[in-house]
Image: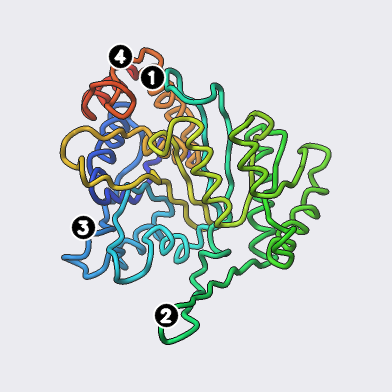
């Protein structure tokens, strides 16, 4: 996209702290004159009163029209409707690739330094496909069905290899449980091995069993670069790798499809601190940086990212969860000051 064009981006503020942290992104984008226009749409608990749904059709239509969305955390009502707004968005928009980056930030205390990992997760199948049911009227036994197809496996694994090439990564680890799940896991593994042969001169490939990978990530995460996995395993791994850098409040996420892309903070809506000006906007801001890179607005992405890193390096103005005393607004203003 030419930098003089103004892209229209769907913005979902969400619930709880969502409006506060999305406002931070808006202020920072304005400060650096990012050439976009926000199309603000509701989703989550806040949408039910007016639209009788946590995910209105008009919000879906906006994302489909604009092609790109930035989303704050949403609360899914318990006991009604679909089980997750995130799952429903991914299903309706066919956002098949979930990308979760885990990169160490300066000054943040964690078990390891200089972590730089990426988990690429298949987003539409596996145990999250929604095929589960009760086995008897008494509801004392239930069954879930995991769906794994060659088409979806090829799509996500090839995406992982292309991601590795474009981001100068040299190694991919395919994570599975094919020793036990011989059909679903076996299909995913064999598909990965076939695709890996196409890239063997450029990308090193290995496959490892999920429980072994979890142990190795805790003991020594440095041999890993890009991990690709089915839906449930990718979900677990992405939270584990976020824990290596200090938690979900520091971990960005992207959901990529062939026609749409959605960028989000995957942490909760934190209703207990909503409106108190305490929230840490880092995860959503880093997700917004990923969005700018997706839009080929790389100069803006780099400038915002460097300003954020500068604030972390100084370590003087940090939110409470990071060991500081700053409000959300003070943290935002420190980043804007660093931009200048």
Question: Which residue is drawn at the image coordinates 19% and 33% (left, top)?
Answer: 277
Which tag, 3 or 1, sits closer to the chain's start? 3
Reply above or below: 259 against 304: below
Contact, mark 2 vs mark 1 (Cβ under 8 Å)? no
Say which of marks 4 and 2 sits in front: 2
Give the labeled residue for mark 1.
Answer: 312
Q: Residue at x 70, y 41 (%)?
A: 172
- Picture disc at residue 139: 2
N-terminal of the pair, mark 2 or mark 1, is: 2
Colour scheme employed for the rendering of this structure? rainbow
Relative placement, left or right, of 241 versus 83 is: right
Kindly report which numbered mark, 3 or 2, lies closer to the viewer in this rendering. 2
Q: Position of residue 269 (x, y in %)?
A: 29, 47
Q: Residue at x 47, y 85 (%)?
A: 136
Mark 2, secondary structure of its residue: loop
In x, y percent, where is residue 151?
Answer: 67, 65
- Residue where numbered disc 4 is placed: 316
């Amino acid at each position: 996209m030419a930098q003089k064009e103004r892209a229209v981006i769907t913005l979902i503020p969400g619930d709880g702290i969502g409006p506060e942290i999305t406002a931070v992104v808006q202020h920072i984008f304005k400060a650096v004159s990012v050439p976009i226009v926000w199309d603000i749409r509701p989703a989550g608990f806040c949408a039910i009163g007016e639209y009788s749904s946590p995910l209105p059709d008009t919000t879906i239509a906006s994302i489909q029209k604009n092609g790109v969305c930035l989303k704050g955390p949403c609360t899914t009502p318990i006991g009604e409707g679909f089980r997750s707004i995130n799952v429903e968005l991914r299903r309706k928009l066919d956002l098949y690739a979930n990308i979760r980056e885990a990169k160490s930030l300066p000054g943040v205390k964690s078990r390891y330094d200089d972590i730089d990992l990426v988990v690429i997760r298949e987003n539409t199948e596996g145990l999250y496909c929604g095929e589960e049911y009760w086995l008897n009227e008494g509801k004392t036994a239930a069954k879930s069905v995991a769906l794994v197809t060659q088409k979806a496996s090829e799509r996500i694994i090839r995406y992982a290899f292309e991601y590795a090439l474009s981001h100068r990564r040299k190694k991919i680890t395919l994570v599975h449980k094919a020793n036990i799940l011989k059909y679903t896991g076996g299909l995913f593994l064999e598909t990965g091995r076939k695709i890996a042969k196409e890239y063997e001169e450029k990308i090193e490939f290995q496959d490892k069993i999920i429980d072994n990978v979890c142990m190795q990530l805790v003991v020594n995460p440095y041999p890993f670069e890009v991990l690709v996995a089915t839906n449930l395993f990718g979900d677990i791994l992405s939270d584990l790798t976020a824990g290596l850098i200090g938690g979900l409040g520091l971990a960005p996420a992207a959901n990529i499809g062939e026609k749409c892309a959605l960028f989000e903070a995957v942490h909760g809506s934190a209703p207990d601190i909503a409106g108190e000006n305490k929230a840490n906007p880092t995860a959503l801001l880093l997700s917004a940086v990923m969005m700018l890179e997706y839009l080929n607005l790389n100069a803006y992405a780099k400038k915002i990212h460097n300003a954020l890193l500068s604030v972390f390096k100084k370590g003087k103005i940090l939110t409470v969860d990071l060991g500081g005393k700053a409000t959300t607004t003070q943290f935002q203003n420190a980043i804007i000051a660093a931009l200048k």
